[in-house]
Image (tube, rainbow, N blue to C red):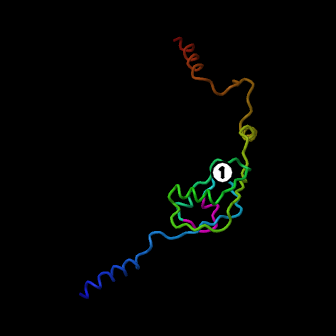
Amino acid sequence: MKRRARAPLLLLLAALAAPPTARAWVLELREVWSTDGAVVRLGDVAAGELPADAAALVLAADVAPGGTLTVDRGAVLRRLVTERLAADVVCRGPEHCVVTFAATRLDPARIEGVLRDELAAWLPRRRPTAPRRLWTSQANCRRRLWTATGL
């Protein structure tokens, strides 16, 4: 009879000794956050430690440089529920986080002009007898080959 009474007690002790499978975590947004990139993840705007899956959650992508974005805690919580990451989450801190994007968009024509000017110093000057274009299409090369060989 004593053995039967010990079995439930041993099972209870084993269950209490096992590590918990889900641990509560705190979602606390910062009031202000500044970034150089165009992607905002939850781990960027959260003030404390987060689970890896929750920290990698993308909140905004391809935001225009120089702009701002307001991250709402309620919207973040809804997104966590949608992604099934909201188990045992406790919300604290401010309701909103204002994200500022410090990066600026570069004009491709300006980059090309600067590169052309810088590379011109490294290239030799064009001789007056040199052809105007260094690259010709394949059709022009074939035509010249046919005329030169008589084909």
Instruction: Please identify the quadrant where the N terminus is shown.
Output: bottom left
Image point (55%, 66%), residue name: 89
Look at label 1 and name its amino acid. Ala
Q: Which residue is mark 1?
A: 38
**Would you place residue 12 above or below residue 2 in this image?**
above
Instruction: Give the percent coordinates (x, y) of residue 101.
Output: 71, 53
**Would you place residue 122 above or below residue 82 in this image?**
above
Q: Is 101 inside the magenta-drawn segment?
A: no
Instruction: Give the percent coordinates (x, y) of residue 18.
Output: 40, 76
Q: In the displayed image of the protein, which residue is found farthest to the bottom?
A: 2
Horizontal arrangement in the rendering, residue 136 relative to residue 82 (left or right) = right
Image point (45%, 73%), residue name: 20
Say which element carries label 1.
loop
Q: Is 47 inside the magenta-drawn segment?
A: yes
Q: How many marks?
A: 1
Which residue is at the front of the view, 77 or 44? 77
Which residue is at the front of the view, 95 or 41? 95
Residue 55, located in which quarter of the rendered image? bottom right
Residue span colored magenta = 42-50
**Would you place residue 12 above or below residue 88 in this image?**
below
Q: In the displayed image of the protein, which residue is found farthest to the top?
A: 150
Q: Residues within 10 Å of mark 1 (few under 14, many from 20)?
A: some
Image point (51%, 12%), residue name: 151
**Would you place residue 1 above or below residue 51 in this image?**
below
Which residue is at the front of the view, 22 or 145? 22
Instruction: Give the percent coordinates (x, y) of residue 9.
Output: 33, 83
